[in-house]
Image (cartoon, helix red, strand yellow):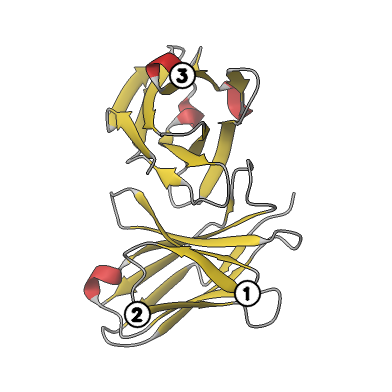
Amino acid sequence: AQSVTQLGSHVSVSEGALVLLRCNYSSSVPPYLFWYVQYPNQGLQLLLKYTTGATLVKGINGFEAEFKKSETSFHLTKPSAHMSDAAEYFCAVRVLGNTPLVFGKGTRLSVIA
Amino acid sequence: EPEVTQTPSHQVTQMGQEVILRCVPISNHLYFYWYRQILGQKVEFLVSFYNNEISEKSEIFDDQFSVERPDGSNFTLKIRSTKLEDSAMYFCASNPTGQDYGYTFGSGTRLTVV
């Protein structure tokens, strides 16, 4: 079965600094990988996804992630943090077929002025 | 942009009571899901539903839970005889084909069992 590990339950960055949220996955077959964001008291919003093709994927709000098969990683980055990026970020994995999304435990991003 | 709608946004119920959480998935989507998130914990899969039947369920989804698509638009999660530990945010999601698309999630129903 597939699984996701997110390193760091809480990450704090200064406004304007690089954001790096780490995600490693485990899957015996090629995975589909996703990042979701959850703002306080809201639902889960899809930031970006990797299915096939280009390994560097761009999402909304200036975020991007790179699929690295050799490292089984799908880290989320943003060059310059904004106060509005403060939220909970979830990495998720699924495989081909109607398999359910499996989420990591989430990383809470705080942005300091 | 199409969205998944969940009602109510917050429900408080007495322990032992039955609750029904409602969801209206995106109209042309074929796969439907329920997830839950206990406060401060990860988002956990409960059940997936396709072609009017459960296609997969987790070990959390025991006989206390049931799902139904009663009228072709609503998708409901029923929790019988609620327990304190059922208190959580419940998310409904839908997906067009079940393949490589991400899910579209609703904004959730916060269930509080007292």
Quarter of the image with the C terminus of chain A is top left
For marks 3 and 2, give the CA distance. Answer: 39 Å
For marks 3 and 1, give the CA distance. Answer: 37 Å
Q: Which residue is mark 3?
A: A69
The image shows residue B2 at horizontal and vertical percentages of 73, 54
Q: Nearer the viewer, residue B68 or A47?
A: B68
Quarter of the image with the N terminus of chain A is top left
Rendered residue at 27%/33% (across/down): A9
In the displayed structure image, the side of residue A104 where residue B8 appears, left or right: right
Rendered residue at 32%/64% (across/down): B59
Number of numbered callouts drawn: 3
Q: Amino acid at mark 2?
A: Asp
User: Label 3 neighbourhood size at 10 Å, few (<14), some (14-19), many (20+)?
Assistant: few
* Visible residue check, residue A113: no
Rendered residue at 67%/55% (across/down): B3
Q: Secondary structure at mark 1?
A: loop
Q: Which residue is mark 2?
A: B63
Circle 1 marks a residue in which chain?
B
Q: Would you identify the image quadrant in which residue A61 lies?
A: top right
Rendered residue at 31%/58% (across/down): B38
Q: Which mark is residue B52?
A: 1
Q: Amino acid at mark 3?
A: Lys
Q: Nearer the viewer, residue A81 or A50?
A: A50
The image shows residue B101 at horizontal and vertical percentages of 64, 43
